[in-house]
């Protein structure tokens, strides 16, 4: 759905759901994951329906992920860091 | 955590905040700028420095505005202002103590200044319809942010929905970057151009913007995208992610399009989260149906020593944001005794003159692209209004019928506005639906009471406060 630019230096290593990826630096976690082909970032805590980043500016909170052990992080606001460990929060009923 | 003191704290490092900081530093003020984004530039000039350095070709394609903004960014960096990225303001007290947290989860910090400027910009107006929560449906500015900050370009069947200059601008930017847009579903009412006509003579003073607008329309309409005018209804459908959209023009039969990405735009509204938390007076702007803080020509709010600049006051674009930022800084320089009133007035003359020029096109634009009823009050009762708690139009109407006559009464009954976004995505729509159900104006219904913390904060982060 979103295609990253060709010829960018992918110098940062992140782990998403146990799998490692080399991604470009100085971009947000949500953008990096979209560049790797992941659109759905979480499930609604109410219905369990799939959700993806909607606003990319910190307003909607649809991009919440667990980052380095901390739940409910706005992945559209946080830049990727070397060694970052990212998990989805898929469990229905878990409230932010 | 000790209280750090400054002369002037500015929230937001967009055009308004940066311009205010540069101006204030010229008069020797000790300035702190806080912004929750990792980089300066605000929404419009997102990632501007990195773009200039890493992707110069794309930077130049963005146009002369970006060159000017880049120069402002450089002046901002070489000023004495202290800048802290990645800091979210979650509360301001009436004694002007300010509380902020970092994206790193570190403890909350406090600071204080005798004058505070809120330059937190605008956000897209929510545009609810059935299926707008599906992955693949996004605010159009989100696609723009992805492009500016990461060079990501959408691929597949791309459909645009809405109206207004920002949608056109972003569409043209995507076209310039080689993206193919499959369809453009324009929601503007047929009558709007006629209603805007009386404002055209005034708008001609801003003819640069008009010419740019005409060029963008031409580019969009000749791009090969299928254009559908007067769209009044839409449904996004798919298993787990967007696969198709069904849409209707007036009373015509519904049509179907395959779609991988649906980008929405229903205009832009001020981000009033902080001015609301503070209890500043707000007024209803009928033309664009939003609330804005009541301001004087220097940006002063109803609360002493708290001012607003840029699009968080009224949505008027980045050039005006710069001017309002500078005017607010002059007022602070005067209030803190760095310049006297006559100097302030003299310094403001050229700024006010340019502002008059900049604002000439606004009444025309605000009438040409009105927010439209099918998206303000969705017809389909099952449409989710509150994305966080998944509350529908039907539930809001039901709560009103049971006697909940204001957003604050509706909220605890059906949890509308109680999720992590704290009503940012549903507040305006909730007021519109309650008003519609009661057959009154949103002015009579009011808005959610915005309480601290305006950003979710953990107990661990709070532990840092004295
Ligand atoms: C997503 C988006 C994209 C846009 N793109 C364009 C465009 O390409 N062209 C155009 O002409 N207009 C665009 N606009 C309109 C544009 O926003 C304005 O005209 C201009 O950017 C307003 O400048 P500003 O300084 O008032 O606010 P902004 O540029 O929005 O800057 C506000 C800053 O405040 C920060 N902030 C907000 N709340 C907090 C808080 N609680 N704590 C800390 N910091 C906070 C934000 O992170 C942001 O950096 C866009 C609007 C949006 C919402
Ligand atoms: S995408 Fe909306 S808050 Fe992150």
Image (cartoon, helix red, strand yellow):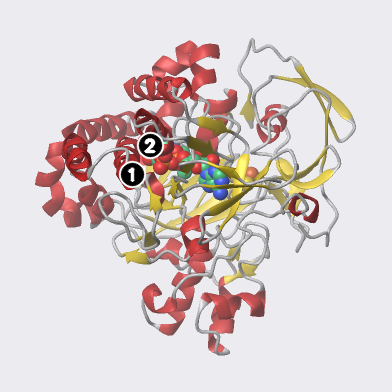
The quarter of the displayed image where residue A70 is located? top right
User: Which residue corresponds to mark 2?
Assistant: B20
Query: At numbered mark 1, what does the secondary structure look like: helix, strand or loop?
Result: helix
Image position of B67 (left or right of B402): left
Image position of B345 (left or right of B454): left
Query: At numbered mark 2, what does the secondary structure look like: helix, strand or loop?
Result: helix
Please give the chain letter of the residue carrying mark 1: B
Residue at x 57% of width, y 23% of height: B151
- Label 2 CA crowd tier, 10 Å (few <14, some 14–19, many 20+): many
Position of residue B364 measured from the top left corner of the image (x, y, whole percent): 21, 49
Q: Which mark is residue B70?
A: none
Residue at x 22% of width, y 40% of height: B344
| Residue A2 higher or lower than B414, as above or below | above
Q: Where's ligand 2: which quadrant?
A: top right
User: Which residue corresponds to mark 1?
Assistant: B328
Q: Are marks 1 and 2 in contact (CB under 8 Å)?
A: yes
Image position of B455 (left or right of B324): right
Q: Residue furthest bottom?
A: B402
Image position of B279 (left or right of B221): right
Q: Residue furthest front?
A: B337
Residue B267 appears anywhere in the view: no
Q: Residue furthest left?
A: B201
- Label 1 CA crowd tier, 10 Å (few <14, some 14–19, many 20+): many
The quarter of the displayed image where residue B136 is located? top right
Position of residue A87 measured from the top left corner of the image (x, y, whole percent): 84, 40
Position of residue B427 measured from the top left corner of the image (x, y, whole percent): 52, 65
Query: Which image quarter holds the C terminus of chain B?
Result: bottom right
**Is B359 in front, or is B197?**
B359
Please give the chain letter of the residue carrying mark 2: B
């Amino acid at each position: 759905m979103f295609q990253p630019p060709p010829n960018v230096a992918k110098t940062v290593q992140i782990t998403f759901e146990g799998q490692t990826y080399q991604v470009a630096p100085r971009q947000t976690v949500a953008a990096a994951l979209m560049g790797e082909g992941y659109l759905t970032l979480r499930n609604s805590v109410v219905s369990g329906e799939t959700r993806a980043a909607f606003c990319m500016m910190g307003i909607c909170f649809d991009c919440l992920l667990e980052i380095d052990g901390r739940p409910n992080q706005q992945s559209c606001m946080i830049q990727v860091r070397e060694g970052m460990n990212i998990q989805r929060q898929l469990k229905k009923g878990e409230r932010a | 955590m000790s209280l750090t003191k400054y002369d002037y704290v500015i929230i937001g490092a967009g055009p308004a905040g940066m311009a205010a900081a540069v101006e204030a530093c010229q008069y020797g003020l000790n300035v702190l700028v806080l912004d929750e984004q990792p980089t300066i530039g605000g929404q419009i000039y997102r990632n501007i420095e990195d773009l200039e350095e890493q992707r110069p070709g794309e930077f130049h394609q963005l146009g002369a505005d970006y060159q000017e903004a880049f120069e402002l960014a450089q002046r901002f960096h070489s000023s004495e202002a202290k800048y802290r990225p990645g800091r979210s303001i979650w509360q301001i007290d009436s004694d002007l103590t300010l509380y902020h947290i970092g994206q790193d989860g570190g403890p909350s910090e406090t600071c204080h200044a005798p004058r505070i400027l809120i330059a937190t910009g605008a956000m897209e107006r929510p545009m609810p319809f059935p299926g707008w929560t599906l992955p693949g449906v996004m605010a159009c500015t989100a696609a723009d942010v992805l492009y500016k900050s990461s060079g990501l370009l959408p691929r597949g069947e791309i459909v645009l929905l809405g109206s207004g200059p920002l949608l056109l601008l972003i569409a043209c930017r995507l076209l310039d970057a080689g993206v193919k847009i499959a369809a453009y579903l324009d929601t503007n009412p047929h009558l709007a151009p006629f209603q805007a006509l009386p404002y055209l003579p005034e708008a001609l003073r801003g003819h640069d913007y008009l010419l740019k607008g005409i060029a963008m329309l031409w580019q969009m309409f000749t791009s090969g995208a299928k254009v559908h005018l007067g769209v009044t209804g839409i449904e996004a459908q798919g298993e787990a992610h967007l696969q198709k959209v069904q849409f209707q023009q007036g009373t015509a039969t519904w049509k179907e399009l395959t779609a991988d990405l649906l980008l929405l735009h229903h205009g832009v509204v001020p981000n009033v989260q902080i001015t609301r938390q503070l209890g500043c007076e707000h007024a209803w702007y009928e033309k664009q149906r939003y609330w804005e803080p009541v301001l004087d020509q220097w940006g002063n709010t109803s609360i002493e020593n708290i001012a607003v600049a840029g699009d968080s006051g009224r949505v008027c674009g980045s050039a005006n944001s710069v001017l309002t930022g500078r005017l607010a800084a002059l007022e602070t320089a005067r209030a803190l005794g760095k310049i006297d009133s006559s100097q302030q007035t003299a310094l403001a003359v050229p700024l006010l003159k340019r502002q008059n020029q900049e604002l000439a096109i606004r009444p025309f634009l605000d009438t040409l692209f009105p927010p439209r009823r099918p998206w303000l009050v969705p017809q389909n009762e099952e449409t989710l209004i509150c994305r966080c708690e998944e509350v529908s139009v039907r539930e809001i109407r039901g709560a009103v019928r049971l006697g909940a006559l204001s957003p604050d009464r509706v909220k605890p009954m059906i949890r509308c506005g109680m999720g992590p976004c704290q009503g940012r995505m549903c507040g305006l729509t909730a007021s519109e639906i309650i008003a519609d159900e009661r057959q009154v104006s949103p002015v009579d219904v009011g808005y959610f009471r915005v309480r601290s913390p305006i950003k979710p904060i953990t107990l661990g982060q709070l532990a840092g406060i004295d």
